[in-house]
Image: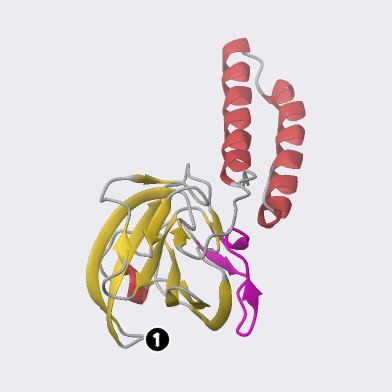
């Protein structure tokens, strides 16, 4: 199953693969060079397909749990000052997504979208300290009945050139549903009220819609 955001790229890549596969025998007469080029083309297509995969991960909504919005590795758990929306101290959890991870962003909690804003910016590596304030990013705040307001931020990395965000102010969203997509490497930050119980550790592998990041 593939994400709709990859439909155009998958169609173009598959078409190019077929055309080049048919042309390679006309260009390369050496058997081993021909096979090497064809294998390279196949691997490239497989990389594109795996990047836009969208595994079905239905879950039972639980307002007492905040689930991981993306697949990746937990790289930050710390108290920070959040300058855009809360303008006070929050507990930040960051998940870094490598190019081989599933890049679908899912709603970590159910509730009402109170804030949604896109920011153009740089393309520093996603783990850079200034990535969350200087890179291309979107900031979304969900008002959840148990946790209150939770902020998540999609951050583009050095390879990511486009962030897709479905959240619009006033929407009612359901935990686990698609919230957007980040193309080719990135990071997602979550901001919780101070005192929130965090269930993950630095270096832990997070799985979207499966790993419980925080509880009440």
Q: In which quadrant is the N terminus drawn?
A: top right
Q: Residue at x 75, y 46 (%)?
A: 11
Q: Residue at x 25, y 51 (%)?
A: 202
- Classify 10 Å Cα crowding around label 1: few (below 14), some (14-19), many (20 and above): few
Q: Residue at x 24, y 75 (%)?
A: 80
Residue 196 appears at what percent x and percent y?
31, 68
Instruction: Work out whether residue 30 or residue 201 is closer to the camera in this orientation and state it.
Output: 201
Q: Residue at x 44, y 49 (%)?
A: 211
Membership of 175 in magenta stretch: yes
- Image height check: is 44 above or below 187? above
Q: In which quadrant is the C terminus drawn?
A: bottom left
Residue 17 appears at what percent x and percent y?
70, 35
Give the left or right position of residue 27, taking residue 146 as reference.
Answer: right
Q: Quadrant of residue 166?
A: bottom right
Q: Residue furthest left?
A: 79
Q: Quadrant of residue 34?
A: top right
Residue 147 appears at what percent x and percent y?
42, 73
Give the left or right position of residue 71, taking residue 35 as reference.
Answer: left
User: Could you say whether the residue bearing mark 1 is in a helix, strand or loop?
Assistant: loop
Membership of 68 in magenta stretch: no
Residue 130 appears at what percent x and percent y?
28, 71
Instruction: Work out whether residue 79 or residue 161 is closer to the camera in this orientation and state it.
Output: 79
Instruction: Work out whether residue 8 or residue 16 is closer to the camera in this orientation and state it.
Output: 8
> How many numbered markers are drawn?
1
Kindly identify which residue carries mark 1.
85
Q: How is the image coloured?
A: secondary structure
User: In the image, which residues are magenta?
Assistant: 161-182
């Amino acid at each position: 199953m593939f994400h709709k955001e990859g439909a155009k790229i998958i169609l173009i890549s598959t078409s190019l693969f077929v055309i080049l596969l048919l042309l390679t025998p006309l260009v390369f007469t050496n058997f081993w060079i021909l096979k090497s080029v064809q294998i390279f083309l196949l691997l490239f297509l497989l990389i594109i397909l795996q990047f836009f995969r969208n595994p079905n991960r239905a879950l039972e909504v639980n307002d007492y749990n905040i689930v991981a919005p993306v697949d990746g590795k937990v790289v930050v758990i710390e108290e920070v000052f959040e300058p855009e929306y809360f303008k006070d101290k929050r507990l930040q959890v960051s998940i870094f997504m490598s190019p081989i991870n599933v890049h679908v962003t899912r709603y970590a909690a159910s509730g009402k979208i109170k804030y949604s804003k896109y920011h153009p910016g740089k393309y520093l590596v996603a783990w850079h300290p200034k990535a969350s304030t200087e890179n291309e990013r979107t900031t979304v705040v969900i008002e959840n009945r148990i946790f209150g307001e939770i902020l998540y931020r999609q951050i583009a990395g050095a390879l990511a050139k486009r962030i897709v965000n479905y959240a619009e102010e006033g929407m009612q969203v359901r935990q686990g549903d698609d919230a957007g997509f980040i193309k080719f490497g990135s990071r997602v930050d979550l901001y919780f009220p101070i005192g929130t119980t965090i269930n993950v550790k630095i270096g832990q592998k997070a799985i979207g819609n499966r790993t419980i990041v925080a509880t009440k």
